[in-house]
Image (cartoon, rainbow, N blue to C red):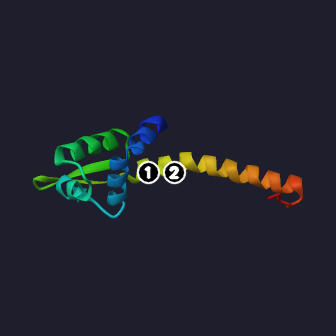
Amino acid sequence: METYSTVLTALADPTRRAIAERLAEGPAPVGELARFVPVSRPAVSQHLKVLLEAGLVSVTASGNRHLYALDPGGVAALRAYLDRFWGRALQSFKQHVESTGGTTHD
């Protein structure tokens, strides 16, 4: 997987996020993905290239088609990166609650 910046930049585009969300349901060829998003087939191929370079999708040949799928390793690495922030947020919340004796102010 590339840098986290590359991955986050790849997912910043709404079309690429839609493609990734569709691929979470299972592998698909470019033609099917092109029917799922409001861009041309060549544009879908370009979006897939960015997702491939970011390590978020993989491609396998199946006859004369290429099937794209989410890359579990790339997704797991991204999740681990994001989980670090969640862990820090929870730790900060815990410290706040403990320091205020569990009271909150509206």
The residue at the point 42 percent across, 38 percent down is 9
Q: Which class describes the residues within 10 Å of circle 1: few (<14), some (14-19), or many (20+)? A: some
The residue at the point 28 percent across, 45 percent down is 48
Quadrant in the picture for the C terminus: bottom right
- Judge whether residue 92 can be spotted in this image: yes
- The amino acid on which the numbered mark 1 sits, given as a three-letter code, is Val
Indicate left or right for 59 with 100 as reference: left
The picture quadrant where one finds residue 54 is top left
Give the answer, above or below, for where 3 lies relative to 104. above
Give the Cα distance between marks 1 and 2.
Answer: 6 Å
Please give the count of numbered marks on the rendered protein.
2
The answer to the question of whether label 1 and label 2 lie on touching residues, with beta carbons closer than 8 A, is yes
- Judge whether residue 70 can be spotted in this image: no
In the image, residue 100 lies at what x, y percent?
A: 88, 55
Q: Which residue is mark 1?
A: 75
Indicate left or right for 86 with 7 as reference: right
The residue at the point 43 percent across, 41 percent down is 7
In the image, residue 70 lies at what x, y percent?
A: 35, 54
The residue at the point 34 percent across, 64 percent down is 25
Q: Which residue is mark 2?
A: 79
The picture quadrant where one finds residue 2 is top left
In the image, residue 104 lies at what x, y percent?
A: 82, 59
- The amino acid on which the numbered mark 2 sits, given as a three-letter code, is Arg
